[in-house]
Amino acid sequence: MGTTEGQDPGVYDVLVVGGGAAGLSGALMLGRSRRSVLVVDAGEPRNAPAAGVHGFLTRDGMEPSALLEAGRAEVLGYGVEVLEGRVTYAASTDDGFVATLEGGRRVGARRLLVTTGLVDELPDIPGVRERWGRDVLHCPYCHGWEVRDRPIGILASGPMAVHQALLFRQLTADLKLFLHTASPPTDEEAEQLAALGIAVVEGEVTSLEVSEDRLTGVRLRSGEVVPRGALVVSPRLAARAGILTDLGLETTELPHGLGVHVESDATGLTAVPGVWVAGNVTNPTAQVLASASAGAMAGAVINADLVAEDTREAVADHRARLSSAAGTRRS
Ligand SMILES: Cc1cc2nc3c(=O)[nH]c(=O)nc-3n(C[C@H](O)[C@H](O)[C@H](O)COP(=O)(O)OP(=O)(O)OC[C@H]3O[C@@H](n4cnc5c(N)ncnc54)[C@H](O)[C@@H]3O)c2cc1C
């Protein structure tokens, strides 16, 4: 069912905030269900700095922008509208939601699917931001293969540094854990690192050495430069939750101080009826395939929720018509 006749043309069945893998997959399910859908996307997907999307079966290595372009073409084919822009505010109304876009346009919707992703808060070390997604990395599954056998450093910038070191040891034998500002490993961790031949380097990392647009080393406060071809960091994962907090939702701390996210059930439904989330805003460790899958699930469940509402209304109308017809026959 599209926008109901007589309804404000600005009211969609579903407003999807964010057009990454999660949002576009949700829009695909909804468009195929003949829902009127607007996707508003600010165009800053999390993996934009990376050269390719890895670990996505049948799309391995595809450029992130090409994947989203293909996704947009698919949803447009089902009548979904896609708008470049940013939703700056959202509120509940008596019969749904109203969102304000940058520039002032207001959009009404019966349901919201928020897939705004997250911000990787990087360690404040000169060079890290510039190299992020290229030879400063976080995820062995996203780009570990691409740096295999290189001298790799792990920066102990988060609570999972030793875990990351163990994972990256699968990809290279030349691995060093830079303690930076972290406490030394526990006895158990030190034993694991030693058993796998992972050297522990003490001292704060103050900058990265780069030559001909490639990372060549890590500089310590002592002035020593340790040659490295890639550096693994643990950003703090901060859900982009502004729209959701407008609606009364709160962010929740992730285990081990990894960051914050917005809680939802297995279908993406939040604590606010009518508001679903999918992808990194709720599951910060979801890769592209898992984010797309969660978006598709949320899209299908939103459609079912709208079907239930449409059916309730149709039954009420039907009963009213029958009762009015019976009244006319009696009189
Ligand atoms: C450097 C790097 C490399 C990665 N490589 C891989 C990889 O190889 N394989 C893999 O599977 N995963 C990879 N990932 C993880 C991948 O980026 C995420 O799994 C994926 O982006 C999550 O999809 P999403 O739709 O939840 O969020 P995103 O892709 O981040 O999309 C969210 C969208 O919402 C938009 N948005 C935010 N706020 C608003 C708003 N208020 N109004 C409108 N739009 C808004 C954003 O601009 C963005 O376009 C990588 C991550 C990083 C950091």
Image (spheres, rainbow, N blue to C red):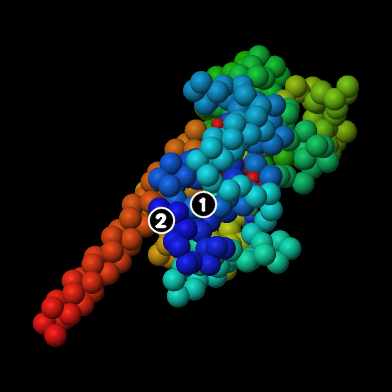
Measured along the vertical axis of the image, is residue 168 above or below residue 110?
above
For the point 64% across and 16% down, the residue is: 148
What x and y, as percent, mark residue 169? 58, 21
Q: Which circle marks residue 269 in the picture?
A: 2
Ligand 1: quadrant of the figure: top right
What x and y, as percent, mark residue 139? 59, 32
Measured along the vertical axis of the image, is residue 103 above or below residue 150?
below
Ligand 1 within 8 A of label 2's CB?
no
Inspect the image, locate mark 1, and give the three-letter code of the amino acid beneath it: Val
Q: Quadrant of residue 64?
A: top right
Residue at the spot of label 1: 37
- Please state which of residues 202 and 296 is positioned toward the viewer in this rendering: 296
| Res 5 visible | yes
| Label 1: element kind | strand
* Side of 288 relative to 304 (left or right): right
| Label 2: element kind | loop
- Please state which of residues 317 and 80 is positioned toward the viewer in this rendering: 317
- Label 2 to label 1, Cα distance in Å? 18 Å
Inspect the image, locate mark 2, and give the three-letter code of the amino acid beneath it: Leu
Q: Earlier in the sequence, mark 2 or mark 1?
A: 1
For the point 53% across and 44% down, the residue is: 79
* Side of 243 relative to 4 (left or right): right
What x and y, as percent, mark residue 143? 63, 25
Assess disc 2: are there few (<14), some (14-19) or many (≥20) residues with their C-alpha within 10 Å of its C-alpha. Answer: many
